[in-house]
Structures are given as C-alpha cells and as structure tokens.
Image (cartoon, grey):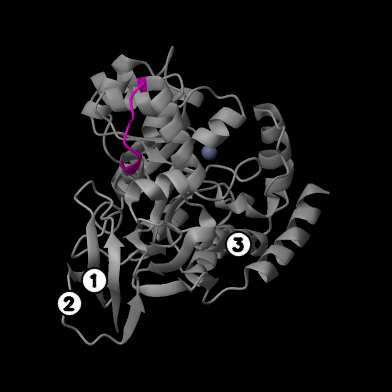
Amino acid sequence: MSILLLNGHVVPGDGSPELPDTDVLIEGGVITAMGKDLPHAADTRIDASGMVVMPGLVDAHRHVWQAPLRGIGADMTLPDYFSMVLGRALSAYRPEDARLAALLGAVEALDSGITSVFDWSNTTVTPEHTEAVLDGYAASGLRAVVGHTVPHSEADLKRLAALDGRISGGLAILGPQFGSWEDGIREIAVARELDLPVSMHASGGPGSPFPRMYEAGLLGPDLNLVHMNAMTPVEARMLADAGVAVTVTPVVEATMGHGVSAFGTFLDAGGHAALGTDVVVNAPADLFEPMRDTLRFERMRSRTMYPAVQVLSNATVHGARSIGLGNETGSLTVGKRADIILLDGLSQPSGGGVVASLTPANVHTVLVDGHIVKRHGLLVHHDLTALRTAGLELARRALA
Ligand SMILES: [Zn+2]
C-alpha cells in the first residue's frame, strides 16, 4: 500500500527548511521519500497543491476520558474540578464507558489534526477498564501512549510495557512534588524497570523535589513534568541539562489560574516545552489555541517577534520526544512513521501561518501510521455526531 501526497508545501516540523511544491511518498506506513516530482505510481494519489503538509500534532498531556464532559466546567476552580470531575464523574465510569470516552476523545483529537496523544488515563482503575481503554484506541486510529494511573497494578503495567506499535504504555503518577518523595522515587523506578515513560503534574518552585532529584542523578528524558508554572530559572537549567520533558497547557493554566506558562523560563534555559490540551471540561479539544496562546505569551514576555513557526516545533517534534515517540513521529523525516496532516485556508502556505491563523476547520486530511483517517474535511471511519450522542448519555449518568 503506497500513498503519494503531490505538490504540497512541506513544513518538516523539526526546524529544517520548508519545501514548496514537494511530494511525499508513503510505503507500508513509513515516509520513504520526499522531493520534487517523485517518479512513482502510488496506489493512492492525493493532490496537496496549495496546502501545508506537516507532521500531525502531538498532544503531550490530555485526560482523554473527559471528552463526554466537554465544557461542563467553564468556571470550575481546582477544588471544584477535583470533587466534580475526578471524584463524582470518574467514579461512575464503567469499563464500557472508559472505552467510549477514549474513542470519542481520540476521534475528536484526530478531527482537529492531532495524531499522537499522551493520555493521562485516570480511568485505568481495574484491568477491565485498562483493556477497554486499549480497545477504544485500537478502534480509533490515533497513536496513543496510555498513561496508567495506578502504579501498583503490576499485571496492567506489564501488559502496557509489552505493547508494540501505534498504541504504547506509560505511567502517570502523583509524583514527588504532590505525593511523598519515597512513593515518587519508587514508582519511577518501577517504570524504568519496564521501560515506560513517566508523566506527573508538578508546579516546580519553592519546595520542589526536582533539584534534589537532579543532585541524586534521578532525572532523565523519560520523565515528563506537566505545568511547572512556578519553575525557577535555576530549576529550569537543571531540567534542561538532564533532558527532562516539560509540558505546558497554557489555555487550562490561564483559565484555572495556575499561573503564567513556564514555556519562556524553560526556553531561556535551553529547553523546548511540549504542548498539551489537558482537560476539555474548560478548554478546547485542539492544539491550535495552545499554540497561539504560547506565541502571544512569548512575544509579550520576551518583547521580541518570536517566530510563529518555532511554536509549531513544540507541538510536533518536541512533543513527540517528550512522550517517548521521538523516533517514530513528530517530523516529516524519511524513515519515520507517516503521521501527516494537510491544512488548507492559507493564501501563502507556511508553518508560521498555521500557528497564526488556522483552526481545526482547516484540517483537510489526516494520516496516522500511513492510514488515511480524514479526507476532504471528513472522518473516514467514524461518525463523530453518533459518538457525541452516546457520550451525552454517559455524561448525564456520570454527573447525576
Ligand atoms: Zn492534567
């Protein structure tokens, strides 16, 4: 099975130069060639003239299971969120609900041009729930790292560690800032034993455990710290030096009052943050708004015209690296898996134009692992309206 994307404006996503009027060849799910007028009779030919051809967006932090609860918490504080969403709603999710929610959230992500997600999967409370979540992703077509949230579920973690392909596993823990030092360090060791990436919410700043972890040699690129709004410049240098991933979710952080994005502090230290949507209870389900928020914050903070296209790398190549998928996806590079989106709507296609001016409505075509999941603006395999209707039923029961 081969696919040829013809004559598009290629934005590689890794900072290398944009390539106008360029073809991209995909064979067996892999990008095998890029260039002008590629001589190849492909099974499927897609005209990309006038469109941006770029890597699919990488959502490095999303609680995908909250898809049915979209918009219920516009004015929620963090304590409200803990009691209503992580308390009441989550406890009502049966395995079949966890499957439906993962599928709905994954399909909404695909529809908006997200091809990979780190799912902070709070619904993985029993082996049956975990199996249901994996089944939802198998049906969805999305590339997913399923972050299991119960660190002592040994069998589940081994099951996740054995996955190979479009769906893989991770560990999502309380971590040594919001939990105890001993638990955090032990759980990170369990994940390292199984070669699973680890994600944790953290603020950094006063009392942060990360300088202590740095001194003890416990930091590494397998750790993904989410938010970090209070991170100090000294701490940022330690994290950047150790290759630790930092993910910012600027829309939710501003909406819920977590503080100013840590993007710039990390950038000053030589680090490149990943971007996340986090929760759709009070934020949009796409990465265009987090990219645009990041661009605005950074231009105000630095008082420079920080280049828009650089923010695209945070949602592609840096995102992929941050969730352990840097070798598979995140850039249009020969040899990587074909996770590719085509975007229309720009009079002069450019990566910067994507960040400045586009929305999910401009997502024309989406490929994941070489499979076409959206074409001509329409999902190929899924009925989003029907999934949302089923999700409404779930939300009604979970919030009753
Ligand atoms: Zn979160």
Q: Give the residue at x 43% y 43%.
A: 356
Whether the magenta-drawn stretch holds residue 305 is answered as yes
Label located before the other in sequence (2 or 1): 1
The amino acid on which the numbered mark 3 sits, given as a three-letter code, is: Leu
Distance CA(mark 3)–CA(mark 2)? 37 Å
Residue designated by label 1: 23
Secondary structure of the residue carrying numbered label 1 = strand
The amino acid on which the numbered mark 1 sits, given as a three-letter code, is: Asp
- The quadrant holding residue 81 is top right
Secondary structure of the residue carrying numbered label 2 = loop
Q: Give the residue at x 43% y 12%.
A: 206
Residue 342 versus residue 194: which sits nearer the camera?
342
Distance CA(mark 2)–CA(mark 1)? 6 Å
Left or right side of 367 for 219: left
Image: magenta residue range: 302-309
Callout 3: CB less than 8 Å from ligand 1: no
Q: Which mark is residue 104?
A: 3
Residue 140 versus residue 154: which sits nearer the camera?
140
Left or right side of 93 for 365: left
Label located before the other in sequence (3 or 2): 2
Viewport quadrant of the N terminus: bottom left
Where is residue 277 shown, x and y percent of the image? 51, 44
Where is residue 253 shown, x and y percent of the image? 54, 30
Q: Is residue 370 above or below residue 89?
A: below
Residue 298 versus residue 180: which sits nearer the camera?
298
Q: Which mark is residue 38?
A: 2
Q: Is residue 44 above or below residue 7?
A: below
The amino acid on which the numbered mark 2 sits, given as a three-letter code, is: Leu
Secondary structure of the residue carrying numbered label 3 = helix
Whether the magenta-drawn stretch holds residue 129 is answered as no
The answer to whether the residue labelled 2 contacts the one labelled 1, judged by CB atoms less than 8 Å apart, is: yes
- Residue at the outermost right position: 400
